[in-house]
Image (cartoon, rainbow, N blue to C red):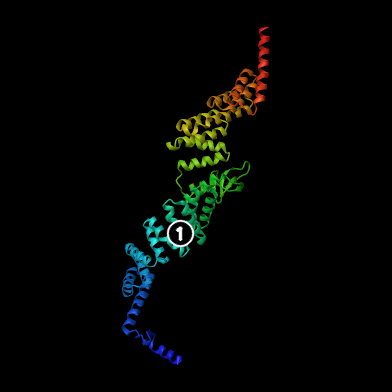
Amino acid sequence: MRAHILVIMSILGPILISGSELSFAAPKTDAEAVEISEAEQQFKEGREALFQGKFNEAIKLLQKAVKEDKTKTSYRLYLARAYYYAEKEKEAQDLLAGIIETTPDHVEAGQLLGEIYAKQKKWTEVVSVLEPLLKYRHDYPTYHLLAEARYNLNDYKQARKHFEEAVKLNPKSGSDYYQLGNIYLASNAFALAAEAYQSALQLGVETPILHYKLGSAYFNLRNYFGKISAVTVKGGGPGTISGDWYLVEPVPGQKDVFHAAAKESAIYQVAKAVAAGIDDTPDIQFLMANIYLNAGRYEQANEMFTKLEKTMPKEDKALFYYYYAQSAFGVHQYDEYLRLLGKAIKLDEATYKSALVDAYLKVADRHNQAGQLDKYIDFLAKAVQESPETASLHLKLGHAYEEAQQYAKAIAQWQMTLNLEPEHPKRMELLNLIEKYRKQLAESAKRKTS
C-alpha cells in the first residue's frame, strides 16, 4: 500500500495534509514556469553583458530580472555591480544598502558598498558597513578596506591591526606593506617600519618617498652607513649611487675603488630617493648632513651644514644651528661650536639653553686633554657661572684650581660643594683637603710676613 502511495505522489506532486484528509497540490501552470525561466534568462544575459563590459545593456536586463523576481538577492547584487561599473554609484549604493538591511551577513554586498564609500572618502561609513561583517568572514578585501578607512580617520591603532591582518591574508600586497610601514614609522617602531618598507620594495612598490622613509627608519635605528665595503666602480664618484652601493669616498691609492655603503643603510636610501627624483630640498640635505654627523664623519658633515646655512627655513634654523654646532665641535673648532650653539639658543632658548653647560664642559675637557690647564679652568668657570647650584661643577673646578696650585680658589669651590651638598659622598675627603691647604696658605703667609 505504501509503495502505491509513493507512486501516486511522484505522479501528482506533493500531498497537502489537511486534518484527516489528503489533498493534492496543483502543479505549476505553464505561464508560471515561463515567468521564472524568463527572469533567469534575463539574469543570465544581464550577467553576461556585465562581464563583456556592456554595462548599460546589463542594467536593462538585470532591472527586468529584479522586477520579475524581487526575492533573488543575486539579481540585485549584479544589478548593483552593473550600476557601479557604469559609474552610477547612487543607484548601486541604494541597492546594496537594501541588500544589507534584509541580509546583514551578505559579505559581497557589504564589500562593494564599502568600496563605493571608500571611493567617496566616506571613511566612517566604510567602517560602519564592514566591521559587522568580520564575524561572518575574515578575508582580505574587508580587512584592506577597513585598514584604509581607519588610517584615514587617524585611528592608527586599529589601522595597524587591520593592515597586519591584511598582509597575512595577502602577503603579495606591496601597498599594504607600505601603509603599514607608515604607521610603524609614525609610532616610532623603526625596526618594524624598515621591515615593512623592505617588503614593499620587494613587491615592486618603488617610489622616491618610500626610499626616503626607509632612510628615515634606518637613521632612527642608528644604521647610518651600515657595513662599509670596498667596491670597484669605473667612472664612479663619491656621493653617488651605483647599483646597490652608495659611494662614500675613494680608497687611497686604488683606482676606481671606493668605500661604499650597502642599500641597508640610511645614507643609501636617502641618496636613492634623491637619485629617483624626490625634490632635493634643504630638508633632504639636512638629513644627509645629519647622517654624516652621526656616523662620525665630521668634516663632510661640517661642509654640508656650511652650504645649507643660507637655505634652511626659518622654522628649522634653531635645530639646524644645534647640529651645525656639533659638526664644528667634531672638527675641533671649539669657538665656532659655542658661537653656533649660541645662535640656536637665541632662536629657541627654552629648548637649547640647557645644552650650554654641557657644551662648556665638553670644550673644557678637550682643552684639558690637550694639556691647556688655563683654558680648562676658564671653561669650567663658565659652566659654573651658567649653573651655579650644581655641586659637581664646583667640585670639578676646585680640583682644577688645585692642579693649577691656586689653593685659595680651590678651597672656595670645595666649600661651595659642601654648602650645596652637606652630605656629599666625598665630604671627609674635601674637609681634609680644605684643612691641608688652609695650613699651607697660613704657613706661606707667615713666611712672607716674617
Closer-to-camera residue (9/261): 9
Give whichever of 250, 318 is nearer the camera: 318
Residue 97 x, y percent position in the rendering: 35, 64
Q: Amino acid at mark 1?
A: His
- Residue 359: image quadrant is top right
Q: Quadrant of the N terminus?
A: bottom left
Horizontal and vertical percent position of residue 18: 36, 84
Q: Residue at x 42, y 55 (%)?
A: 149
Q: Is residue 243 above or below residue 324?
A: below
Q: Quadrant of residue 442?
A: top right
Above-or-below relation of 28 to 160: below
For image coordinates 64% across by 24% down, the residue present is: 399
Q: Secondary structure at mark 1?
A: helix
Looking at the image, residue 283 sits to the left or right of residue 403; the answer is left
Up the image or down, 211 lies above or below 63; here it is above
Horizontal placement of 96 versus 319: left or right? Answer: left
Judging by the rendered image, the residue that carries numbered circle 1 is: 144
Give the percent coordinates (x, y) of residue 157. Answer: 47, 52
Q: Position of residue 226 (x, y in %)?
A: 59, 46
Query: Compared to 258, does 126 lie above or below?
Result: below
- Residue farthest to the front? 20
